[in-house]
Amino acid sequence: MNTVASRLIHSKPSVSRLCTLAASRDARYLSTDSNKVDEPFKVEEAETVNVPPPPSDKLLVLGGNGFVGSHICKEALDRGLSVASISRSGRPSIQEAWANNVTWHQGNLLSPDSLKEALDGVSAVISCVGGFGSQSYMYKINGTANINAIRAASEKGIKRFVYISAADFGVVNYLLKGYYDGKRAAETELLTKFPYGGVILRPGFIYGTRNVGSVKLPLGVVGSPLEMVLQHAKPLSQLPLVGPLLTPPVNVTAVAKVAVRGATDPVFPPGIVDAYGIQRYTQQKSR
Ligand SMILES: NC(=O)c1ccc[n+]([C@@H]2O[C@H](COP(=O)([O-])OP(=O)(O)OC[C@H]3O[C@@H](n4cnc5c(N)ncnc54)[C@H](OP(=O)(O)O)[C@@H]3O)[C@@H](O)[C@H]2O)c1
């Protein structure tokens, strides 16, 4: 523990982060700013050892057939893990070789019984389940569905669970209340049920190649240049209301790498990793 603690790097909480804290009081943040004893802690960055996981590790990706989920499945296979996915539609139409190496389950997280079999023998879970729609639908898919999965995984004694959440977007949070309320409720459940192995990624916009049927959409055309500009705009992100809109976009492969590390590295610190944290983790060299 001392080693992990000594690797944490100081960070000053921003206004936007404090707003975030107010919105999710129960969430656990880690920091090492000893002058701010009354403030919750947040993991800003920690150096973990990026070594390949044991080959026996089995990862279950919830929503492994989606945009982020498919990149996570591919990254986990590249790192030698055994990979399974569960989603309502099961195996996607992707005609790529890696898809043959994933065990595709069909199930709906809103009916938790359909998840039980898929959790057998699993050592870690990553959830990419989320979506948009009416306010109540957004709460169910981002919140209830993930809360069901977190509880089922905890009952099975699984040690690590990574949830792909989302960065706050200031005023947008009010328009997408169901989405953000659902995300924050799932985060709270995760930190409660997985105090030592719960990792929350909070990216802003995620760019990369999205498969839509047989068509590949290159979302990087917009996201990549924006990331270059906005990764240096961290002080501006502290401005009230508009600041959160300046959260830099992150590449989907970066999200996938950090998610797989969070699920497999036993010293990856539990807690929240924001867009800047995702960028920093991916810049760390593998050893
Ligand atoms: N894309 C972004 O820019 C972005 C930014 C920030 C955060 N995020 C978050 O990252 C996560 C992944 O996003 P994405 O863009 O990859 O979304 P996506 O492509 O729509 O993937 C969502 C996945 O969830 C599955 N799913 C939805 N409802 C389900 C249910 N009831 N039971 C089981 N599976 C269900 C979907 O598969 P089926 O339809 O087959 O069930 C799909 O695999 C989401 O939580 C999203 O909020 C995304």
Image (cartoon, helix red, strand yellow):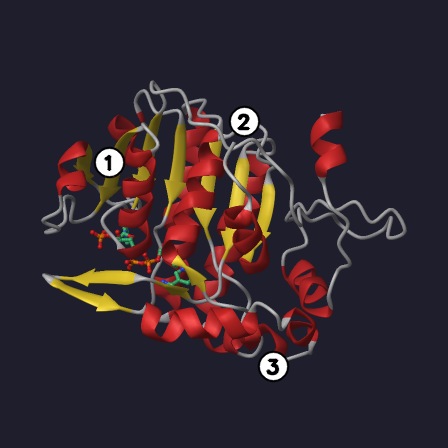
- Front in this rendered view, residue 224 or 154: 224
Q: Which residue is mark 3?
A: 242
Dot 3 and dot 1 residues touching (CB under 8 Å): no
Q: Quadrant of ligand 1?
A: bottom left
- Front in this rendered view, residue 60 or 276: 276
Whole-percent x, y for residue 86 in the image: 24, 40
**Secondary structure category for the residue under label 2:** loop
Whole-percent x, y for residue 60 in the image: 32, 34
**Secondary structure category for the residue under label 3:** loop
The relative height of residue 175 versus residue 213 in the rendered view (above or below) is: below
Within-10-Å neighbours for mark 1: few <14, some 14–19, many 20+? some
Whole-percent x, y for residue 66 in the image: 26, 53
Q: Earlier in the sequence, mark 2 or mark 1?
A: 1
Camera-near label (2 vs 1) is: 2
Does the beta carbon of the residue at mark 3 sit less than 8 Å from ligand 1? no
Would you say 213 lies left or right of 22 here? Answer: left
Mark on residue 114?
A: 1
Does the beta carbon of the residue at mark 1 sit less than 8 Å from ligand 1? no
Q: Which residue is mark 2?
A: 266
- Front in this rendered view, residue 238 or 179: 238
The answer to which image quadrant residue 198 occupies is top right
**Residue at left 46%, top 74%?**
226
Q: CA distance from mark 2 to mark 3?
A: 37 Å
The relative height of residue 272 versus residue 172 in the rendered view (above or below) is: above
Camera-near label (3 vs 1) is: 3
Give the residue type at disc 3.
Val
**Secondary structure category for the residue under label 1:** helix
The relative height of residue 49 versus residue 31 in the rendered view (above or below) is: above
